[in-house]
Amino acid sequence: MAGTVAGMAAYLKARIDGGTLEPGNKLPPTRFLMHQFDLSDNAVYRAIALLKAEGYVYSHQGKGVFVADRRKLISGAERIQGITQVGETIHHKRSVRVQAPEWVAAHLGEGECVNRVRTVNRGELVLQASQSWVHLDVAEVVPEIDEPRPCNPTWQAVYAERSGNSVEVASKTVDARITTAEDREELNLDDDFAVLVMRSIYVTGNKVIGVGEGVYAPGHPLSIS
């Protein structure tokens, strides 16, 4: 009997949670997984995409798929509670409908989505510039995401309450890069710096409904321990 995408994902998650598959271990090749779980190649890719969305694995281009170190993940509650500290404020700058950028479309799907942009400030100092790209299905339930203002407490929480579908967040990657022109504009930087970047994937069930990126200004560290 053929396996299922959810069954493959659940099996590998259990092995990772149980320590049988450890951080840095490489997953078997696609053909092996197809045979092991009696799935098509497309179904295997979908199962791996679910594991990536929940932060269990990550891809290394040209080398394969590897088990992530889940000690570095930031849970949804910690992420939401940790947005601001005392003396910091959130400024919602814009909320517009755009075509999903290529890297976002790889998770959210191609087409139009809602792009929300905000900064976290301490006085005039910009500490963090964040963007989220939200699926239009969410806008049907939470129409206020089309406006550049906060949702109380977050669009994820409002969507979950109104739709009855839970929303989970997995920290997709935590990395560093040299500032782009957009980074410098949003963070009010006059020169290039190395900045910390966190990208997160928001899911409800097996569906990705949002992608987020936070860029942290120099001197404003993000704890991932």
Image (cartoon, rainbow, N blue to C red):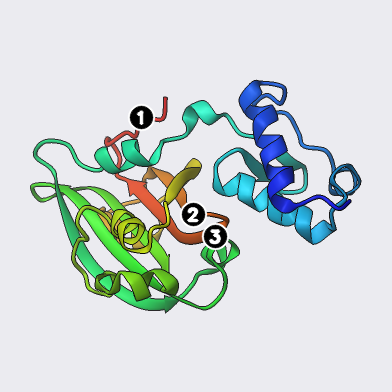
Quadrant of the rendered image containing residue 139: bottom left
Q: Residue shown at 74%/55% (left/top)?
A: 45
Q: Tell me whether the residue at label 3 lies in contact with that at label 1, contact meaning CB atoms closer than 8 angstroms.
A: no
Please, what is the three-letter code of the amino acid marked with disc 3?
A: Lys
Q: Position of 156 compared to 174: left or right?
A: left
Report how far apart the C-alphas of labels 1 and 2 lie in the structure. Answer: 23 Å
Q: Position of residue 104 (x, y in %)?
A: 52, 63
Q: Is residue 221 above or below residue 193?
A: above
Circle 3 SS class: strand
Q: Residues within 10 Å of mark 3 (few under 14, many from 20)?
A: few
Please, what is the three-letter code of the amino acid marked with disc 2?
A: Val
Q: Residues within 10 Å of mark 1 (few under 14, many from 20)?
A: few
Circle 1 SS class: loop
Which residue is identified by label 3? Answer: 207
Q: Residues within 10 Å of mark 2 (few under 14, many from 20)?
A: many
Report how far apart the C-alphas of labels 3 and 2 lie in the structure. Answer: 5 Å
Q: Position of residue 195 (x, y in %)?
A: 38, 43
Which residue is identified by label 2? Answer: 203
Q: Residue shown at 91%/46% (left/top)?
A: 35
Q: Position of 122 compared to 29: left or right?
A: left
Q: Residue shown at 72%/42% (left/top)?
A: 65
Which residue is identified by label 1? Answer: 223
Q: Is residue 149 above or below residue 27?
A: below
Q: Position of residue 15 (x, y in %)?
A: 70, 28
